[in-house]
Amino acid sequence: MKYIEISAGKYASKWGLTDWYPEAEEKLRAALAQEDNFQTEWFGCKKEIRYARISREGDTILVEVSAHMDDLWEEDDLIYDALWETCHVEEELQEEIIDSIRDAMIDEGIDDHTELSEEIPATSTFEEITETIGKLEDEAEKNNRIMYKDLCDCVKAHVDYMNTEVL
């Protein structure tokens, strides 16, 4: 399978995955014009933490999209975003509370990103691929919003519990 680098180490798009930079669009169109199987690198957009990859093998094209929020597992940013949104406070949470929130997110199957994919016919045009990317990007962002709301609810519940006197 031929490897195609459409972003040349930079971004392939600006505002979203379908807002193509001309060079990236040109490279993908050129790859589609060939009959060879190919796979692009994971390419991203400049303004959002989103990535896509396109593979053509045989009779199908696989479109993959990954949409990320802030890091939930290595950093505390997403938890503190949820704390501000739900409680409007900037106080530091104890590490045990952060660990408890993360454990609850694991139990609920909540993550800090969504990955989706869809197979379409190998005869699909650039425009059809772009449409599929846009649809998957929208679905991934919708799922991220749902997970973020669940995180907000969890953070609020933990803060409410911390502020309740335990007899």
Image (cartoon, rainbow, N blue to C red):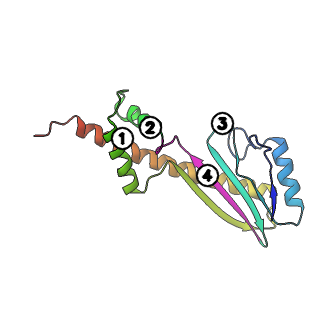
Image position of 15 with respect to 56: above or below: above
- Classified by dominant secondary structure, the portion drawn in magenta counts as strand
**Residue at x 35% of width, y 29% of height:** 92
Numbered circle sitting on residue 66? 4
Tell me the quadrant of the picture where the N terminus can be found: bottom right
Give the Cα separation between the discs numbered 1 and 3: 28 Å
What secondary structure is marked by label 3?
A: loop
What amino acid is labelled 1 in the image?
Ile
Give the Cα separation between the discs numbered 2 and 1: 8 Å
Residue at the outermost left position:
167
Residue 91 falls left or right of residue 130:
left
Q: Which residue is mark 1?
A: 98
**Residue at x 85% of width, y 43% of height:** 23
The image position of residue 140, as x and y in percent, is 57, 52
- Circle 3 packing at 10 Å, graded few (<14), some (14-19), many (20+), is few
Q: Which residue is mark 3?
A: 47
Magenta highlight on residue 158:
no
What amino acid is labelled 4 in the image?
Ser
Instruction: Specify the segment rendered in magenta.
Output: 60-74
What secondary structure is marked by label 4?
A: strand
